Amino acid sequence: MTDWLVGLMETLGAPGAGLAIALENLFPPLPSEVILPLSGFTASRGEMDLLDVLVCTTLGSVIGALALYWVGALLGRERTLAIAAKLPLVKPADIEKTEAWFLKHGRKTVFFGRMIPIFRSLISVPAGVERMPLLSFTLLTATGSLIWNTIFVMAGYLLGENWSLVETYVGIGSKVVLGLVVLALVVFVGVRLAERRKGRHASRR
């Protein structure tokens, strides 16, 4: 994958890094933890302008996030509830609770979510479902992405040949986040199965 990124940046320059980041929003297996430090390292060698890299990668983040926002907007609340009703162990009430929480904390979620692995991409979908004002979504996404991108681009720029260290350490954080998500899912499933058992016992009496 590194060779592909290098080739993209050699061909397109900073816009190539921005394109890679836009695709990363849509295809999470393309990790920003690799794209951004590598872009910074490339800039440190004088092959790209550092400011151009920051502008293009942030623009790429916004474009990718907007694509997912419109996926959520096209899906809509009613379709989301209809899909939830067909999923095992998921209740429409779960979606309604999530909706209420997002309406209350959506702005902070979009801003800080841009700096959390895994959630960086996913947070755009509920924002679209809830039709968060497009201007607010774009500004919050751009600001959060600029902070995230600057940290990782500058890390690659300053580390030089050792830019891959960023991926190593951030990869640990990503695994922790993924582990917490899996744990939350396990707890959720366990609670729902317990509720079902109680319901069956109550109906037999």
Image (tube, rainbow, N blue to C red):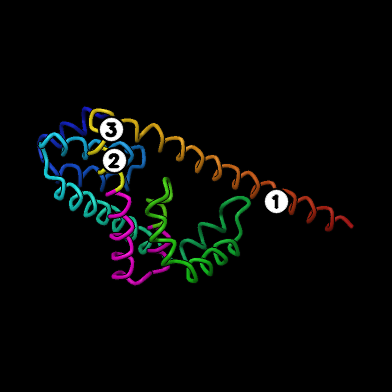
Q: CA distance from mark 3 to mark 2?
A: 7 Å
**Image coordinates for residue 139, horizontal then vertical, percent:** 29, 66
Q: Are marks 3 and 2 in contact (CB under 8 Å)?
A: yes
Name the residue at 20% across, 50% down. Answer: 54
Q: CA distance from mark 3 to mark 1?
A: 43 Å
Reading the image, the residue beneath label 2 is 155
Question: Which amino acid does the dot numbered 3 rest on?
Answer: Trp
Question: Which amino acid does the dot numbered 2 rest on?
Answer: Ala
Q: Residue 147: say if magenta.
A: yes
Task: Give the number of the mark in front: 3 or 1.
Answer: 3
- Outermost residue on the right side: it is 205
Reading the image, the residue beneath label 1 is 191
The answer to which of marks 3 and 1 sits earlier in the sequence is 3
Location of the N terminus (image quadrant): top left
Residue 98: mark in rendering: none
Name the residue at 38% across, 61% down. Answer: 111
- Between 113 and 158, the one lying in front of the other is 158
Reading the image, the residue beneath label 3 is 163
